[in-house]
Image (cartoon, rainbow, N blue to C red):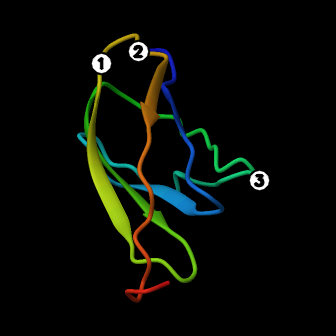
Amino acid sequence: MNARDIMSDLPQAGVFIARGPVPVSHVAALTDTQGRFALRFPAAGSYQVARVAEGYAPLSQIVEVADEQEQLRLEQRLPPDRPGR
């Protein structure tokens, strides 16, 4: 099965697969200066992708990865850890 990539525009965050349809361990990435990252998914299915960054509340999202899907795009802003930031 082909690897799957996921791209996003989150500023300097740590991104990891928190849950998936198959055991997933140590699948993580750091965003670049543009907030982009790539993750490889081992199989098709539903995954919980989590993002954390200093000064921001953690955020996670469920994404569906289809067979032979090459790329997904996430566009979400991390909410400030404290209101007013």
Name the side, left or right, on which 41 lies relative to 22. Answer: right
Q: Tag 3: residue type?
A: Thr
Characterize the local packing of mark 2: few (<14), some (14-19) or many (20 or more) Cα atoms within 10 angstroms: some
Q: Tag 1: residue type?
A: Ala
Real-space Cα distance between discs 1 and 3?
A: 29 Å
Q: Secondary structure at mark 1?
A: loop
The answer to which of marks 3 and 2 sits earlier in the sequence is 3
* Residue in view at x 40 percent, y 10 percent: 68
The residue closer to the viewer here, 54 or 50, is 54
Residue identifier under label 3: 33
- Dot label at residue 66: 1
Tag in front: 3 or 2: 3
* Residue in view at x 60 percent, y 38 percent: 38
* In this view, 63 is above or below 14: above
**Residue 58 position in % (x across, y down):** 39, 72
Real-space Cα distance between discs 2 and 1?
A: 5 Å
* In this view, 38 is above or below 61: above
Characterize the local packing of mark 1: few (<14), some (14-19) or many (20 or more) Cα atoms within 10 angstroms: some
Residue identifier under label 2: 69
Q: Secondary structure at mark 2?
A: loop
* In this view, 1 is above or below 15: above
Q: Secondary structure at mark 3?
A: loop
